[in-house]
Image (tube, helix red, strand yellow):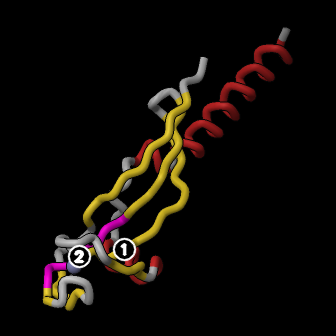
Amino acid sequence: MFMIGQGERTVPVGPPEPQHCPRCEEVTDFQPQLKYKFGQFDLLFGFVYDKRYQLTCPECNHGWHLDKRSMEQNIGKLPIPFHIRFGFVILLGLAAALGAAYMVTHAAA
Ligand SMILES: [Zn+2]
């Protein structure tokens, strides 16, 4: 039995940086954010898709996208829970282990 869910999260990455906001027409503390969508099976294993970095104005939410590669070099560790980032790999690993165990037990019989 599988429960499948999905969601979207926005998490702040790094310190805010002052930028001039063309909408507020003043300098505000723009917050770098990572926004991602994820799917989840059974609330245990998940996968991430549609990952993007953005810099947004705290006043009006105006913002722009940031370069993914340079952002990931800057922040080092991704603020995404492990089981969501690598859930698919874990799931595949489990399936492979179960498959191998099945073959071993049935080959012996
Ligand atoms: Zn603004």
The kind of secondary structure element at disc 2 is loop
| Residue found at the far top of this picture | 109
The disc labelled 1 sits on which kind of residue?
Gln
**Range of residues picked out in magenta:** 28-34
Question: To which quarter of the image does residue 92 belong?
Answer: top right
x, y percent for residue 52 = 45, 68
Q: Which residue is mark 1?
A: 54
* Disc 2 residue: CB within 8 Å of ligand 1: yes
Q: Which residue is mark 2?
A: 57
Q: How far apart are labels 1 and 2 at the CA level?
A: 10 Å
Residue 75 as seen in the image, left or right of residue 98: left
By secondary structure, the bulk of the magenta-drawn segment is best described as: strand
Question: To which quarter of the image does residue 73 belong?
Answer: bottom left
Q: How many marks?
A: 2
Residue 97 as seen in the image, left or right of residue 67: right
Q: Nearer the viewer, mark 1 or mark 2?
A: 2
Is disc 1 in contact with disc 2, using a CB cutoff of under 8 Å? no
x, y percent for residue 46 = 51, 41
The disc labelled 2 sits on which kind of residue?
Cys
Residue 57 as seen in the image, left or right of residue 40: left
Tell me the residue at 18%/90% (across/down).
Answer: 25
Looking at the picture, does residue 85 appear above or below residue 29? above
**Camera-nearest residue between 57 and 40:** 57
